[in-house]
Amino acid sequence: MADPSITRSEVAPNLIVEAGVAITMEPGADPVANVGIAVTGDRITEIADLHVLRSVHPETPTIGGPHMIVLPGLINAHQHLTGDRLIRSMIPDDLEAGRSIYEWAVPAHAAHTGDDDQLSATLSLLEGVTNGITFTVEAGTVAHPDRVLAGFDAVGVGGTLGSWGWDVAGEPWAGSVAEVLDRQREVLTLTETHDRVDGWVTLVGHDLMSDELVVSASELARSNGTGLTFHLSPSSSDAVSYLQRTGKRPAVHLNNLGVLGRHVLIAHGVHLDDQELELLLASDTALAYCPWAYLRLGQGVTSAGRHVEFIGRGGRVALGCDAENAGDAIDVLGSVALAAGLAKDMAVDPTLFGARAALQHATLGAAEALGMATEIGSLAVGKRADIVVIDTAGPEWIPRSPDPILQLVWASDGRSVCDVVASGRVVVRDGESTMVNRSELAIEAAERHARLLTDAGLG
């Protein structure tokens, strides 16, 4: 922890977050007892001994307390904010591969209105923030990005925003290469001055993008200094398709096209061979790893997943939750525990990838994967004030372990989150949003759910 005598801002903070234990996730830092975190505007301006901080700023409002654990806002690196939410946990979990997409998800997206997109995004982000997620990478299946941005604003959190990006004839919201790229540029313009949400070039991916589209999309992202994300190889089918079309596996083909690089976040990357793994490492391409989705969909992560090997060799990985008919729950702490458990079990090695290593990839390691480590991912002076307060009064915290990270990951999940600060604003207090009315949203969701099923032919 920083020395309590750290130089203090001349401006009084507008909030102090009190922590019985602070898990800063800064490199090499251990959890520290009795810490105060001063927030001024949207930034962390001081981290110091709680009693010292309170004595200097006795009038500043506080949240947290001596029995609370505080950690940085969690990052969800892959979340579908539209389509699935309003048919949540409805797609049967015993369908053959592909049927869930084309018989359920695509019709639901095709029937979505702008109002549906905004409500869906608001509900998903609301669930995420009450589970401690303050930054979400939107997965791109969005027809009305302005309405999804309104959802971000309603809940008060940050993230990245994309739009539908595929040039597949006859599919909803598809278009020509020029049309898809124009849609991406519109999102970049829409978010240009936003202080919490960044526009990313966002394609559907798989083998649903022509070479011309993916090359142009990568160039657009590079030229605008932003990210590119798309789905690739959650199952073995993408490799089959690419081999048939190009004679090469997906990552090999994309590397030959010059698409890969530090600006790219590939969603999934479960089925990668040795050459593909080497190329992703060499190009510093990042992966978004959503382990619950692969188990729910039976995509073979236990036999093929190499994410922990990728991390061990210097690869950048962030954890995600995926859609509400894949990972279903928007709780990245659940993904942290599962990622750790899978790593140990797949290698039959209990020494591998412990709780702290896994939590890293929902915090600072995730921020590094997104190219945002100077902004988010840890508790440090100057960073965005994204802060999660964990209530240790629940039964999962009795008795308290001397290792708070071990207990947070293995015994707890998002249910322990009580307060959340996002960009300096308290957006969750005592487990409830301070920004939106959950009861009113529930009534609207029930109405739109029924209408959507009928319009999509799913009722």
Image (cartoon, rainbow, N blue to C red):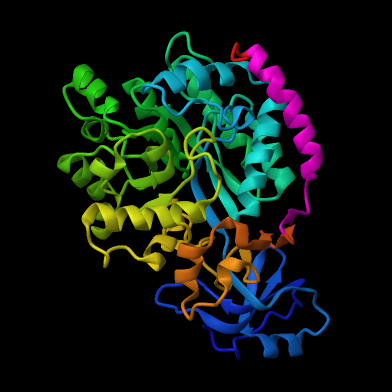
| Residue 290 visible within the image | no
As for residue 430 lying within the magenta part, the answer is no
The picture quadrant where one finds residue 114 is top right
Assign the C terminus to one quadrant of the image: top right
Is 227 situated left or right of 113 in this image?
A: left
The correct choice, above or below, for 347 with respect to 180 in the image is: below
Please state which of residues 224 and 7 is positioned toward the viewer in this rendering.
7
How many numbered marks have been drawn onto this rendered protein structure?
0
On the image, the x and y values in percent for residue 297 come to 40, 33
The residue under the point 53% across, 24% down is 182
On the image, the x and y values in percent for residue 104 come to 51, 19
On the image, the x and y values in percent for residue 149 come to 66, 38
Please state which of residues 327 and 156 is positioned toward the viewer in this rendering.
327
The residue under the point 66% across, 19% down is 452
The picture quadrant where one finds residue 145 is top right
Is 289 situated left or right of 142 in this image?
A: left
As for residue 447 lying within the magenta part, the answer is yes
On the image, the x and y values in percent for residue 190 come to 64, 35
**Segment colored magenta:** 431-455
The picture quadrant where one finds residue 81 is top right
The correct choice, above or below, for 296 with respect to 112 in the image is: below
The overriding secondary structure of the stretch rendered in magenta is: helix
The residue under the point 67% across, 61% down is 420
The correct choice, above or below, for 63 with respect to 35 in the image is: above
Please state which of residues 142 and 100 is positioned toward the viewer in this rendering.
100
Please state which of residues 32 and 406 is positioned toward the viewer in this rendering.
406
| Residue 345 visible within the image | yes
